[in-house]
Image (cartoon, rainbow, N blue to C red):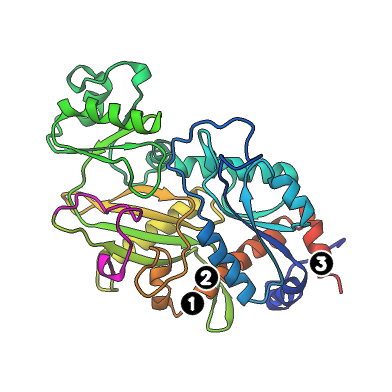
Amino acid sequence: MMGFVYDFSQLPNYLEILRKKLRIAVIHGGDKAAQGAVIYQTHNPRSTKTYEVVAHDIAAALEDLEFQHVFVLPDDSTLGDRLRKHQIHLAWLNTGGVQGYNPVCHTPAILEMLGVPYIGHNPLNSSILDNKHSFKRELQGLGFPTAPFMIWHPAQGKFTAKDNARFQQTFGDYQGSFLVKPVSGRASLNIHFVDQPQDLGEAIANIHQQTHNTALIEPFLTGREFCVSVCGYVRHRQGQFEKLESPFTFSILERLLEADEKIFTSMDKKAITGQRIRFLNDSDSAKKKLAKLAQQVYWEFSLNALIRIDARMDAMGNIQILEANPKPDLKRPAANVTSLVAQGLSEEGMTYEDLILSLISDRLDYLLTNHAQIIPHITALLNP
């Protein structure tokens, strides 16, 4: 469409057209053991999970929203051929990658090479957000609150805290406990609580044995644990679209720890239910602080897709950012299980379908506002 001029007020009309024409692929993680998925199977330092069930939740919501051409596809070496076969116009990334190091950035890079726009983070941001040490370095450089840290890989030799200059420089006379975690991972897996510095080497070795990757060391923060979700500026609720002045923050929650829990137990080991979380009310000063931090992260990292930020208070009550999840779980809420993102939708007067429509509409708004000239295959669909 030559000379296409986008008008946000026309977004509902554009969506009516696109519901009939737009061909959408919801992409979940592939199985590297499947025939033809890869050339050679290799290692993935992130624990393997395909997210296929959630991909079908997203696809079903899109179909409920009357998008007529929705396909669920695996993320593997056959993806390009499948996208071409189904004449896909737009992809929704619900994948953590197939295998290898930095797998979260593989698929957006392939889609950019193929010229297929997508809902998800660009390759650089995908990698930064998924690698805790890279994210924390960016946070430090931008002045965000995050606990001091260092990383170590066994290739650098055996780790001994008392002889390590970097450790002494980073933690000084700190006398508390530590957490040791993989630099890339999901669902609070393979995290070690360490009381004494002399035990850090064993924790690092255990993490390397499990992940074949670098370990991150940081102080254990003793305060309350939180999460907050943040996405773009377009929101749909109660039948109406609105374009906000700031990124949309929601599901601002406190994770409730049991007496024997140092950190929130992985959803792979214990389902997330309403009994494990608590909404922050407006009188809790942490709620406003978390919302502001999330919006600032979204701005400063130039994000244009959903993330969930995890944070915790230190002993002084200061909120410290722990990490960001670039592909938070979008499981449809059910009676006894939910996701940390979807749990707070009712507080916003929104449904699961509202969230899905908000995310796809925000991406279309971004593309049509800023990149209409490079998505002619989509703008052409809007021709009468």
Which amino acid type is shown beneath numbered disc 2?
Leu
For the residue pair 289 and 342, the one nearer the viewer reads as 342
Residues at marks 1 and 2 touching, judged by CB atoms closer than 8 Å: yes
Main SS of the magenta part reads loop
For the residue pair 309 and 259, the one nearer the viewer reads as 259
Residue 19 lies, with reference to residue 195, above or below; the image says below
Residues at marks 1 and 3 touching, judged by CB atoms closer than 8 Å: no
Which amino acid type is shown beneath numbered disc 3?
Leu
The residue tagged 2 is: 355
For the residue pair 200 and 140, the one nearer the viewer reads as 200
Q: CA distance from mark 3 to mark 2?
A: 24 Å
Q: Residues within 10 Å of mark 1 (few under 14, many from 20)?
A: some
The question of residue 265 being in magenta is answered with yes
Which amino acid type is shown beneath numbered disc 1?
Thr
Return the x and y of residue 101 as percentages of the image width and height: 50, 33
For the residue pair 41 and 6, the one nearer the viewer reads as 41
User: Which residue is depicted at the point 62% across and 44% down?
Assistant: 107
Q: Residues within 10 Å of mark 3 (few under 14, many from 20)?
A: some
The quadrant holding residue 46 is top left
The residue tagged 3 is: 381
Rendered image: mark on residue 351: 1
Return the x and y of residue 113 as percentages of the image width and height: 72, 41
Residue 265 lies, with reference to residue 142, above or below; the image says below
Q: CA distance from mark 1 to mark 2?
A: 7 Å
Query: Which sits earlier in the primary sequence, circle 3 or circle 2?
Result: 2
Q: CA distance from mark 1 to mark 3?
A: 28 Å
Return the x and y of residue 98 as percentages of the image width and height: 55, 41
Magenta range: 260-279
Task: Specify whether 52 is left or right of 18.
Answer: left
The question of residue 166 being in magenta is answered with no
Residue 254 lies, with reference to residue 125, above or below; the image says below
